[in-house]
Image (cartoon, rainbow, N blue to C red):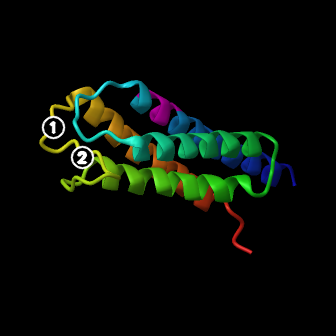
Amino acid sequence: MTGTTDMTRTTDRRVELAAWALLVAQVVHGLTPSDTDAEGYAGLVGGLVLLVATMAAILGLRQGRPWARTLLLGTGLAVAVGFVLYHATPISSPVTNPYIGEPAGPAAWITVVLSIAAGLWAAHAARASRPLA
């Protein structure tokens, strides 16, 4: 029985670490300046909602709440897909801020890639840690 408890704690730590990485990536991206013309409120509001969702998932994970992994799974996927659609596609619209063709700079691109990777890692960790039953 101890082995199962130890394995569960290790899995929980991995999921929480992935959630913290997602939070850090989101905050760093938000603090990284990028010189683009298309910035609008969609990214600000959407980013804030996803940031709050990430913090809620971390809190839920720390408290052992059963909904926390599901929230992290959805939030991680939303961040990864959202960053691709919002920054990495060449389509300009009121709800996108494409970096392609803009002087966004390497720091902005690095934070986009890190946010996508952190989102995918968080979603994978949350999904992989769910019980199969």
Q: What residue is pinned by disc 2?
A: 98
**Residue at the far bottom in the pictured view:** 133
Mark drawn on residue 102: 1
Residue 104 or 92: which is nearer the viewer? 92
User: Would residue 32 be found to the left or right of residue 92 on screen?
Assistant: right
Q: Where does residue 107 sit, x and y in percent of width and height? A: 27, 27
Q: Main secondary structure of the magenta part?
A: helix
Question: Callout 1: helix, strand or loop?
Answer: loop
Q: Is residue 61 magenta?
A: no
Image location (x, y in percent) of residue 7 = 73, 50
Mark linked to residue 112 = none
Q: Which sits in the foreground, 123 or 129?
A: 123
Asked whether the viewer can see residue 14, the reply is: no
The answer to whether residue 121 is left or right of residue 17 is: left
Question: Which amino acid, mark 1?
Answer: Glu
Task: Work out whether residue 48 or residue 108 is closer to the camera in this orientation and state it.
Answer: 48
Image-quadrant location for residue 1: bottom right
Task: Residue 132: give x, y in percent of width and height.
Answer: 69, 71
What's drawn in magenta, residue-wise?
24-28
The residue nearer to you, when weighing 75 against 117, is: 75
Residue 129: percent from left, percent from top: 65, 57
Identified at 67% across, 48% down, the residue is: 11
Q: Residue at x 26, y 36 (%)?
A: 109
Q: CA distance from mark 1 to mark 2?
A: 7 Å
* Residue found 35% across the figure and 41% down from its top: 40
Q: Is residue 55 left or right of residue 60?
A: left
- Which image quarter: residue 10? top right
